Amino acid sequence: MQEKKIRIEKNSVQETLIVPLYGRKMCAEKFPDLYNDMSAKKLCEKLDYDFSEQEAKKDSFAYEFGALEAAMRQLDIMYEINDYLKTHPKAAVVNLGCGLDQTGKTCDNGSCRIINVDFPDVIKIRTQLIPVGEREKNIACDLKDYSWMKEVAGDNGAVFFAAGVFHYFKREDVKNLVLELSRRYPGGRLIFDTVGKKGLELMLSKSLKNMGISDVGGFFSVNNAARQLNWSDKIRVTSKGYMLGYYDMKNPGIKGAHRFLAKIGDSLLKMAIIRMDFSA
Ligand SMILES: C[S@@+](CC[C@H](N)C(=O)[O-])C[C@H]1O[C@@H](n2cnc3c(N)ncnc32)[C@H](O)[C@@H]1O
């Protein structure tokens, strides 16, 4: 008997999880030397979602670049999580706005705890599709309602990451969340991706329009991390290029033009991975 597929509604914030998921599936298919995690492909097959638009464009240069963006972000964030786990092997690894991303599991060292947080309807879908491991927990909550933090103990360290999430937040919401995390989890780390104002306009114009939002002005963008994220003397902020800050992308199948655009993304559009270390 064929398994019943899980429906994802169009034009919702939740639908935003499709873009990185499909990107990771495509990247594993097209650039397996760079990224070989097939879990996104398996998940896409279980969804009742019309992928025809994505399928029609999947061999275009822009879509290939989008796939690389999804994979690079995950690889960069994994690098920082694994680095934190070297000194905090029992830490809580917390995926903020997890969607259907399984980075926590990919970084599992056998002793950490894995926590995934997203809106209730996303967590419902996630629970139907992805079995929860023995050291893993899903929390259904709006990230702006800090009650979820009560379920995350930081005694053995905590590393938080948000991939493709803060673009949908207002600047003040990101700042308040960051300050709250730094107060509750001394010695913790937070990793997230950012883009400059121009880049955000380009990136989100379609998805925000679909959600009825016309102006990206108040949304979170970062042109200069050192200056704009200087929110507390208890937080050390560092940043690296999102596309080329961690890996050189010199893998089979990746064209010079992809790398050129990656350079433009990092330098002109200010695509970055931000790491924040909270003082102990
Ligand atoms: C672009 S998707 C990224 C999903 C995942 N991080 C990934 O890389 O595949 C954004 C995710 O953030 C979640 N999200 C956005 N705002 C949120 C909020 N205030 N509280 C909880 N989750 C939120 C959405 O539901 C969605 O799953």
Image (cartoon, grey):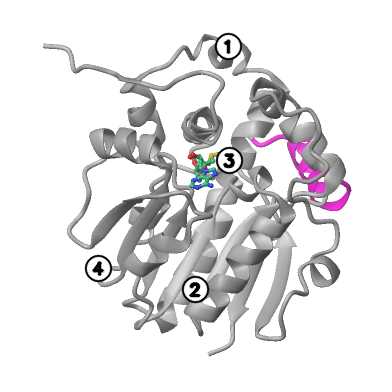
Q: Position of residue 246 (x, y in %)?
A: 65, 60
Per the image, the residue denoted by label 3 is: 70
**What distance separates the C-alpha of mark 3 from that of mark 2?**
20 Å
Nearest the eye: 43 or 175: 175
Quadrant occupied by the N terminus: top left
Beta carbon at label 3 within 8 Å of ligand 1: yes
Q: Is residue 22 above or below residue 71?
A: above
Q: Earlier in the sequence, mark 3 or mark 2?
A: 3
From mark 2 to mark 4, how far is it between C-alphas? 15 Å
Q: Position of residue 263 (x, y in %)?
A: 81, 47
As helix, strand or loop, the secondary structure at mark 3 comes to: helix
**Does the magenta segment cover residue 158?**
no
Q: Residues within 10 Å of mark 2 (few under 14, many from 20)?
A: few
What SS does tag 1 mark? helix
Lower sequence index among marks 4 and 1: 1
CA distance separating discs 4 and 1: 39 Å
**Which numbered dot is residue 83?**
2
Residue 5 vs residue 31: left or right? left
* Nearest to the observer: residue 172 or residue 26: 172
Is residue 262 on the magenta stretch?
yes
Q: Give the CA distance from mark 1 to mark 2.
A: 38 Å
Residue type for callout 2:
Asp
Image position of 96 (left or right of 151): right
The region drawn magenta spans 254-268
